[in-house]
Image (cartoon, rainbow, N blue to C red):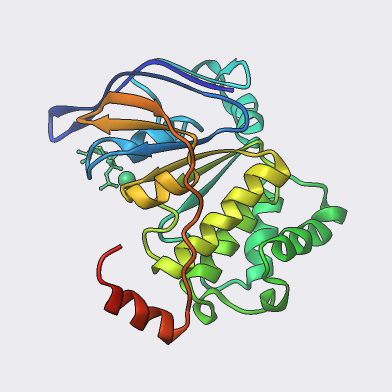
C-alpha cells in the first residue's frame, strides 16, 4: 500500500547540508499498524511527512496506492493526499473555532460535498466519543479529548491511511491507552492502515504488527511483532496506590 524506495532527504541550512534520511526503503501493507521508532533526531517525523509528500524527498520514490507521489503535481497531488489523514503530538487544532468547526474546516478544505459536511462531522465526532463536546472550544478540553478531535478531523474525509506523529507523547498513561484503543478500532473497524511514529516502546509494542527502527536517518532494522495489547490503566487513586506499592512492573 505504501512503498518507500531508496529515499534520501537532505536539508540545507546556513550553507551546510544535512542528510536527515539516507537511502530508506520500506513497505507498509494494507491493514498494518506500522511503527517507526528511534531516538530524537533519527528522522522519524521527516520519514512520516514523506508519506504524504509534506516533505519532498531529495531522491527516491514514495508510492502510495500504486501512485508515485513524487511525480504528481497540483490537483493530482491534492487528490492523492485526500486518502491520507494525519495527527500530531500537539493536536494542531484551530483554537478560536469550536470542535465542530475544526472538523468542518477540514471537510471544506477537502472539498467534501457541502450539504453532507455537517452530518459527516457529527458522525466522526460521535465515533471518537465527543458528541457532547461539539460546541466547546479546544481550551475547554483535556489532552485526550483534544487528540480525539485531531483524530475526528483526520478521519472526516474517509482516508485509507492515518499518519500519527507521536500521537500520545503529550498524554498520561491512562489517556494514552484510551487513544491507542481508538486507533486500534479505526484500524479494525474502518480498515484504515496506520503508521505511528513514537519514541515510546510501550506504545509501539502494544498495537503495532511491524516496526522499523530508525537510527541516524537509516533503517537499522525492520521487525514483525505480535501486538501485546493495550495495558489497562485506571483513573482510580487506589490503582495508582497499588501500582506504587507494587513497585516496578
Ligand atoms: N526543516 C528542516 N531543516 C533543517 N533540518 C531539519 C529540518 N527538519 C528536520 N531537520 C533535521 O533532521 C533531523 C531529523 O529530524 P526529525 O524531526 O525527522 O527527527 P525525529 O526523529 O522526528 O526527532 P524527534 O523525536 O525529536 O521528533 C534532525 O537532525 C533535524 O534537526
Ligand atoms: Mg519527530
Q: For this view, does 177 lie left or right of residue 74? A: left
Quadrant of the frame with the N terminus: top right
Q: For this view, does 39 lie left or right of residue 121? A: left
Q: Residue 65 versus residue 221: which sits nearer the camera? A: 221
Percent of width and height locating residue 212: 36, 30
Quadrant of the frame with the C terminus: bottom left
**Extreme-front residue of the structure:** 246
x 29%, y 24%: residue: 219
Task: Please say whether residue 169 is visible from this viewpoint.
Answer: yes
Task: Please say whether residue 93 is visible from this viewpoint.
Answer: no
Q: Is residue 145 above or below residue 119?
A: below
Picture quadrant of ligand 1: top left
Q: Residue 30 versus residue 18: which sits nearer the camera? A: 30
Q: Is residue 122 above or below residue 164?
A: below
Q: For this view, does 161 lie left or right of residue 230? A: right
Q: Quadrant of residue 42?
A: top left
Percent of width and height locating residue 163: 51, 41
Percent of width and height locating residue 80: 63, 29
Amino acid at each position: 500500500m505504501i512503498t518507500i524506495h531508496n529515499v534520501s532527504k537532505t536539508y540545507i541550512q546556513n550553507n551546510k547540508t544535512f542528510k536527515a534520511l539516507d537511502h530508506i526503503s520500506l513497505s507498509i501493507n494494507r491493514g498494518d499498524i506500522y511503527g517507526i521508532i528511534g531516538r530524537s533526531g533519527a528522522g522519524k517525523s521527516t520519514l512520516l511527512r514523506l508519506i504524504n509528500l509534506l516533505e519532498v524527498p531529495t531522491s527516491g520514490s514514495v508510492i502510495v496506492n500504486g501512485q508515485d507521489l513524487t511525480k504528481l503535481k497540483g490537483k493530482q497531488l491534492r487528490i492523492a493526499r485526500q486518502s491520507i489523514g494525519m495527527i500530531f503530538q500537539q493536536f494542531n487544532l484551530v483554537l478560536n473555532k469550536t470542535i465542530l468547526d475544526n472538523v468542518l474546516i477540514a471537510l471544506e478544505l477537502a472539498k467534501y460535498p457541502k450539504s453532507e459536511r455537517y452530518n459527516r462531522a457529527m458522525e466522526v465526532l460521535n465515533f471518537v466519543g465527543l458528541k457532547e463536546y461539539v460546541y466547546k472550544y479546544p481550551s475547554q478540553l483535556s489532552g485526550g479529548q483534544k487528540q480525539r478531535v485531531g483524530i475526528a478531523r483526520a478521519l472526516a474525509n474517509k482516508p485509507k491511511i492515518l499518519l500519527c506523529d507521536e500521537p500520545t507523547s503529550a498524554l498520561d498513561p491512562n489517556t494514552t491507552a484510551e487513544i491507542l484503543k481508538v486507533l486500534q478500532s479505526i484500524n479494525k473497524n474502518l480498515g484504515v492502515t496506520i503508521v505511528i511514529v513514537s519514541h515510546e516502546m510501550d506504545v509501539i509494542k502494544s498495537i503495532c504488527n511491524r516496526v522499523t527502527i530508525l537510527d541516524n536517518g537509516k533503517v537499522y532494522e525492520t521487525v514483525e511483532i505480535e501486538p501485546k495489547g493495550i495495558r489497562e490503566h485506571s483513573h482510580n487513586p487506589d490503582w495508582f496506590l497499588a501500582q506504587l506499592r507494587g513497585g516496578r512492573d
